[in-house]
Image (tube, coloured by chain):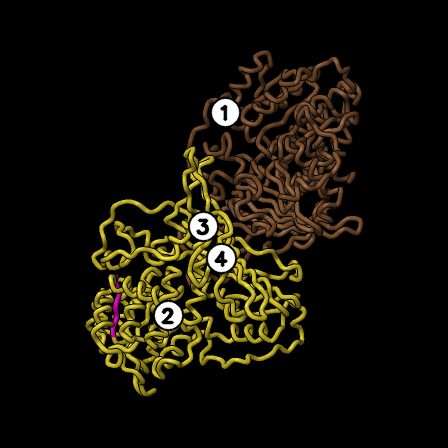
Chain colours: A yellow, B brown
């Protein structure tokens, strides 16, 4: 890992020279503040302070038990609420300048930006010894997830990915039950979401638009390739575009896959295979827009034997396509909750649950009648899913080593798995021309994955999706 | 079934009063020509002579025993090629008028029009004692398929659905393998198509166009309810609208499900469930287009096991979603046919795979295909699907086998239409009395469950609203 790590550092340095300078010049011990007495306030900087951050920051702030010490957003419209709430906190547009100027005044950074900026910002902060809370998915690329996972250890910072379900009671219950053998050997997991709930599989937005005065478009693009401003990308809809987002999987995968990932100790997958909902603009005119994610997908991700745990096949469905109803589920019983769900199949039974593992039930559901299910053998998190941010804040004060529900050691490999699905989708969309000039799709097969090396071994073009090129900006 | 048959007859009588008159007044034996001496030619009238109708007629005309005697089409543009090919054939716009005026000069009728008009045209012709060749899917509604199946028996006419693959060698090879027990008993069938390969699921077109002078819109609608003309419908994309078509299942289901249906010997399903891709034109609020067939779907049917055999589950996928590649298939081996679709029959002892139309059947692993040596027990159809029907018509009812007679094609079509019933039921929504945080209306979808099918009575037994899709209302006057 050393070589790769160095390479990563070089990559990030190119892009965050301020952070890099900090890393090289300032000794570790003067950067962060190390141990903070629990009575002291944690000084938190928010990067990306609108949208989801309007939940994250107040929960970290916790009515003033901690400080929101700095704010950063590339869009003044999105930051209005945060700036109103914390008028004294210095406000920046460029996170690099913020880290440079405020480095000594902050202990931790909460990152709630579009996916493509998660890793550059998180890495820059970690290099400065800051604890980080990063929204899900942890990163845009598999490679970045690996790098952040290593960096958390290297810089000894407290980390948390923003999949708040990981702090829930339900995920601990499922982990307890599955590890206690409730279902026997679990061999298949179905996971689905109703996402995308925004247009996907559409043509890339075009046209000339004036950049709103409140928005620094260059900074919004960050490491992404240069593109003219288009209002169709923001806010939130960037999720459907490969330069910025990571589609349905990126949006909801970390919420639905984390429970099986944790309970079954899945680790790196060994293969991925997908098919996607097609899009046609006219009779026989298929449109494959490789700049965007498809309207729907069904993806098979295979995990190997892990010690005494049998191999697991995970099947992911999005865009409205669902798994088959389990035979044990009565015809009139509801399977699909609004956001999606999960079904575990083992040698001794099946378990169905909703988002974050909620309302878990054995199948047939009659098995739950008068049954006393085991209590969680893992400590519950104060506030459950709603305590996810505060758990991190408190852990930051205790210092590296304090437990968080979704630290990068767990969230990194989980995110890699989620992103494996996207790698398969993008390989499925990948085309070449054959010798006769016909479009062919050589990536439409089972892709074999070498997790340690981060490499698809039977289809080289897929590996371009492991790690993208950053723009210098 | 007697009551239903009567009801059906009444329904059709209302619409095809000419046919009805014929049925009631003229004794059966003078209506059709019954047995035709082999030296005679089969006089075929075409209902729908463009597009697939055009190629159907061309295929019929390859037989020296066929005469294309009348052409009927509602669209001057679509019929052009056929008129050029069969200049002596008199042309009609309204098939009702054609059958009335030319009854005595017609032996058989080919129906190749949008799905919603198949049944009424075919039944009228059958009531007049005409043999019929009807494009797939046989009908638009389950009820219609049941009626045509009965009618074929009742009127003793030679019938063939236009799923031409059923006359191919592939499905016969698969049957021979299956009957020889090579894959044991089938427990699961996976079927997929890349259709729709046109935009679908996007709601009623917004275009406002005058009806082109070449098109008789009222006749094109046939028994469909009165509605505004949109240029997108004609000549092809009507397939994607429930008022006229039957979506990807109707388009390709008869070609793809057929080989499995025949090989395994399936009958009526006893349950169906589905899911389909959602459409978002703007963020957060899905579009609601219940009039459109979906852009992609997943349908699961269950067939009760017969004679102690296990139940068979059939999983249909369209719009790009395909099954997982079987373990036995090499990483670089083709799955199904080249992108169009495929069929996988999973048995207790092995697997059979083929492409659309039953093409290129293989045992898995594919190396096994050459290793097995099963004797040929089922006659091949070297003359092809079209000529087979012509020869059977000339021989007379019950004298020669055809590959897809309505007694087979009817239940096959019902199965396909069961999938559509589920897809349409999926979109039944009920507005909730409460609204969400957004203030937008909230809906529940009570049909999103497993639908239990009582095949004998043609009825969903656990969700009555679904039964509206078993049989639709015809337009007044039809």
| Quarter of the N terminus of chain A within the rendering | bottom left
The answer for how far apart the CA atoms under marks 2 and 4 are is 33 Å
Residue B200 percent coordinates (x, y): 49, 41
Q: Estimate how packed mark 1 is, as few (under 14), some (14 to 19) or many (20 or more) residues with alpha carbons within 10 Å.
A: some
Left-right relation of B100 to A96: right
CA gap, disc 3 and disc 1: 52 Å
The label on residue B215 is 1
Numbered label attached to residue A150: 2
Cα separation, mark 1 vs mark 4, equals 42 Å
Label 1 or label 4, whichever lies nearer to me, is 4
Q: Mark 3 or 4, which is nearer the eye?
A: 3
Q: Secondary structure at mark 2?
A: helix
**Marks 1 and 4 on same chain:** no
Residue at screen point 24% across, 68% down: A20
Q: Is residue B424 visible?
A: no
Subunit bearing disc 1: B
Can residue A295 be found in the magenta stretch?
A: no
Q: Position of residue B124 (x, y in %)?
A: 68, 27
The chain containing the residue under callout 3 comes to A
* Residue hosting label 4: A194
**Which of the two discs, 2 and 3, labels the residue nearer the N terminus?**
2
- Could you say which is closer to the camera, residue B352 or residue A100? B352
Q: Which residue is mark 3?
A: A459
Are both tags, 3 and 1, on one chain? no
- Secondary structure under the numbered disc 3 in the rendered image: loop
**What segment is highlighted magenta in the picture?**
A70-76
- In primary-sequence order, the first of circles 3 and 4 is 4
């Amino acid at each position: 890992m050393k070589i790769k790590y160095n390479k990563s550092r070089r990559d990030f340095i190119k892009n965050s020279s301020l952070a890099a300078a900090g890393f090289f010049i300032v000794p570790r011990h003067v950067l962060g503040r190390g141990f903070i007495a629990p009575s002291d306030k944690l000084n938190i900087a928010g990067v990306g302070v609108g949208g989801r951050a309007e939940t994250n920051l107040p929960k970290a702030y916790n009515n003033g038990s901690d400080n929101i010490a700095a704010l950063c957003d590339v869009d003044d419209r999105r930051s209005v609420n945060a700036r109103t709430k914390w008028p004294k906190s210095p406000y920046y547009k460029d996170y690099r300048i913020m880290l440079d100027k405020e480095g000594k005044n902050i202990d931790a950074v909460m990152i709630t930006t579009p996916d493509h900026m998660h890793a550059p910002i998180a890495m820059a902060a970690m290099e400065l010894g800051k604890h980080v809370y990063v929204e899900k998915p942890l990163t845009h690329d598999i490679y970045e997830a690996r790098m952040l996972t290593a960096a958390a250890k290297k810089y000894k910072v407290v980390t948390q990915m923003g999949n708040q379900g990981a702090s829930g009671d339900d995920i601990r219950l499922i982990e307890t039950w599955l590890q206690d053998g409730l279902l026997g050997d679990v061999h298949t997991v179905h996971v689905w979401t109703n996402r995308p709930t925004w247009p996907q599989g559409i043509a890339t937005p075009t046209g000339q638009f004036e950049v709103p005065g409140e928005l620094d478009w260059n900074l919004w693009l960050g490491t992404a390739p240069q593109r003219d401003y288009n209002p169709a990308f923001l806010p939130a809809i960037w999720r459907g575009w490969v330069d910025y987002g990571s589609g349905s999987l990126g949006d909801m995968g970390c919420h639905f896959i984390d429970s099986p990932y944790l309970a079954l100790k899945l680790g790196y997958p060994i293969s991925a295979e997908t098919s996607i909902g097609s899009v046609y603009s006219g009779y026989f005119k298929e449109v494959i827009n490789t700049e965007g994610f498809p309207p729907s997908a069904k993806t098979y991700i295979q995990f190997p034997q892990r010690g005494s745990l049998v191999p697991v096949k995970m099947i992911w469905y999005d865009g409205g396509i669902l798994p088959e109803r389990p035979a044990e589920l009565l015809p009139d019983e509801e399977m699909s909750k609004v956001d999606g769900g999960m079904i575990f199949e083992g040698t001794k039974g099946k378990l169905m649950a909703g988002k974050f593992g909620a309302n878990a039930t054995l199948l047939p559901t009659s098995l739950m009648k008068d049954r006393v299910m085991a209590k969680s053998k893992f400590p519950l998190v104060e506030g459950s899913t709603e305590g996810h941010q505060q758990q991190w804040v408190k852990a930051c004060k205790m210092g590296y080593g304090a437990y968080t529900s979704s630290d990068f050691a767990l969230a990194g490999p989980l995110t890699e798995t989620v992103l494996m699905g996207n790698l398969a989708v993008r390989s499925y969309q990948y085309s070449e021309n054959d010798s006769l000039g016909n479009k062919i799709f050589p990536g439409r097969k089972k892709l074999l994955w070498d997790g340690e090396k981060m490499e698809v071994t039977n289809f080289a073009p897929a590996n371009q999706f492991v790690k993208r090129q950053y723009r210098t900006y | 079934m007697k009551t239903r048959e009567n009801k059906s007859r009444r329904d059709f009588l209302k619409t095809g009063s000419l046919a009805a008159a014929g049925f009631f007044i003229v004794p059966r034996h003078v209506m059709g020509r019954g047995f035709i001496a082999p030296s005679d030619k089969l006089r075929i009238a075409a209902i729908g002579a463009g597009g697939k109708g055009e190629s159907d007629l061309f295929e019929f005309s390859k037989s020296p025993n066929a005469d294309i005697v009348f052409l009927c089409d509602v669209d001057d543009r679509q019929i052009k090629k056929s008129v050029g090919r069969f200049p002596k054939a008199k042309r009609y716009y309204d098939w009702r008028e054609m059958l009335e005026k030319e009854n005595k000069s017609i032996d058989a009728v080919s129906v190749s029009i949008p799905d919603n008009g198949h049944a009424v045209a075919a039944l009228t012709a059958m009531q007049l004692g005409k043999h019929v060749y009807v494009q797939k899917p046989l009908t638009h509604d389950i009820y219609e398929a049941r009626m045509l199946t009965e009618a074929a028996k009742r009127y003793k006419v030679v019938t063939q659905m236009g799923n031409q693959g059923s006359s191919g060698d592939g499905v016969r090879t698969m049957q021979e393998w299956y009957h020889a027990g090579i894959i044991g008993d089938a427990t699961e069938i996976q079927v997929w198509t890349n259709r729709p390969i046109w935009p679908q699921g996007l709601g009623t077109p917004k275009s406002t166009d005058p009806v082109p002078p070449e098109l008789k819109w009222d006749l094109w609608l046939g028994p469909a309810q009165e509605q505004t003309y949109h240029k997108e419908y004609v000549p092809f994309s009507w397939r994607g609208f429930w008022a006229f078509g039957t979506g990807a299942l109707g388009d390709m289901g008869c070609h793809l499900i057929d080989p499995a249906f025949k090989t395994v010997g399936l009958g009526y399903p006893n349950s169906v469930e589905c899911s389909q891709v959602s459409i978002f034109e703007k963020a957060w609020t899905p579009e609601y287009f219940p009039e459109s067939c979906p852009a992609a779907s997943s349908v699961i049917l269950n067939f009760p096991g017969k004679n102690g055999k296990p139940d068979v589950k059939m999983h249909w996928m369209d719009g790009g979603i395909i099954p997982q590649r079987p373990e036995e298939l090499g990483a670089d081996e083709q799955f199904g046919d080249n992108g169009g679709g495929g069929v996988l029959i999973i048995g207790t002892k092995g697997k059979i795979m083929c492409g659309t139309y039953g093409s290129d059947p293989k045992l898995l692993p594919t190396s096994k295909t050459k290793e097995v040596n099963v004797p040929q027990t089922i006659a091949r159809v070297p003359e092809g699907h079209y000529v087979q029907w012509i020869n059977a018509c000339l021989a007379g009812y019950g004298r020669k086998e055809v590959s897809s007679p309505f007694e087979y094609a009817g239940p096959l079509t019902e199965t396909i239409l069961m999938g559509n019933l589920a897809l349409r039921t999926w979109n039944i929504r009920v507005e909730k009395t409460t609204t969400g945080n957004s203030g937008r209306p909230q809906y529940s979808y009570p049909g999103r469950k497993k639908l239990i099918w009582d095949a004998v009575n043609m009825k969903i037994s656990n969700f009555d609203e679904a039964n509206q899709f078993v049989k639709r209302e015809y337009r007044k006057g039809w």
